[in-house]
């Protein structure tokens, strides 16, 4: 029996493998799983729309915070991003002072002087209106590692995330959102 190439079978195999590869790529680039306690645990869908105040956003770990996060093992070694609420936008007045994270004169969260293991934390020294292209992120969790400690983040690096399967509740986003100016 002689074997001959079958163009139709090769095409179906190529299309099938391409579909599986595309689906895997889509899942890797469009979903994220949160297993930390500072946001609801679960699966999140990453959106392409620009984030708005109160949205949950995915952001790359800020370079200035990366070393401390790794050293203290706040996240698994493979983690390269954080999920937080977007709490302030360009022009909002943000201050990290007197033990409080404030946006437009409203206290959003306390600033801890030490982490849950008693190791010292140093808050961001930023206080003033957020410049164009920058935002502040936070979480209702009192021990969350967010803008309280690493300051404003580039708005262009944020991706909106929608929870698909949240396994616990936290304070609603609206509680964290600073009142509009």
Image: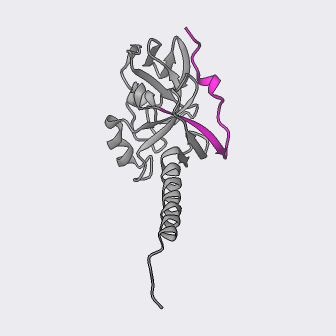
| Residue at 66 percent of width and 46 percent of height | 165
- Say whether residue 63 is visible: yes
Location of residue 85 in the rendering, given as x and y in whole percent from the top left corner: 54, 30
In this figure, what is the number of numbered marks?
A: 0
64 and 98: which one is in front? 64
Quadrant the C terminus occupies: top right
Instruction: Identify the magenta region.
Output: 159-181
Q: Is residue 60 left or right of residue 19?
A: left
Asked if the magenta segment contains residue 160, the reply would be yes
Single out the residue that lies furthest toward the top. Answer: 181
Task: Report which quarter residue 176 is drawn in.
Answer: top right
Residue at image coords 67%, 39%: 169
Which scheme is used to colour this image of the protein? one colour
x and y, in percent, of residue 78 in the image: 41, 53
Question: Can you give x and y, in whole percent of width and height, for residue 38 in the image?
Answer: 55, 39
- State whether residue 101 is above or below residue 76: above
Q: Residue furthest bottom?
A: 1
Question: Is there any visible trace of residue 123 in the rendered image?
Answer: no
Q: Position of residue 96 (x, y in %)?
A: 43, 20
**In the depicted view, which residue is nearer to us: 11 or 176?**
11
Residue 173 painted magenta: yes
Residue in the picture at 39% in, 43% down: 69
Residue 109's place in the image compared with 5, above or below, is: above
């Amino acid at each position: 029996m002689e074997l001959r190439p079958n163009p139709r079978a090769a095409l179906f195999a190529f299309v099938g493998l391409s579909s599986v590869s595309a689906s895997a790529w889509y899942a890797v680039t469009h979903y994220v799983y949160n297993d930390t306690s500072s946001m609801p645990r679960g699966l999140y869908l990453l959106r392409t729309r620009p984030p708005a105040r109160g949205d949950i956003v995915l952001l790359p770990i800020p370079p200035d915070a990366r070393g401390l996060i790794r050293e203290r093992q706040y996240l698994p070694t493979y983690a390269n991003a954080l999920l937080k609420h977007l709490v302030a936008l360009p022009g909002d007045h943000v201050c990290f002072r007197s033990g409080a994270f404030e946006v437009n004169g409203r206290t959003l969260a306390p600033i801890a002087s030490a982490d849950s293991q008693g190791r010292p934390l140093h808050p961001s020294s930023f206080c003033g209106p957020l410049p164009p292209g920058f935002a502040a992120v936070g979480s209702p969790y009192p021990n969350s590692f967010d803008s309280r400690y690493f300051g404003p983040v580039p708005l262009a690096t944020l991706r909106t995330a929608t929870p698909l399967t949240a396994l616990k509740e936290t304070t609603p986003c609206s509680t964290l959102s600073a009142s509009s100016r």
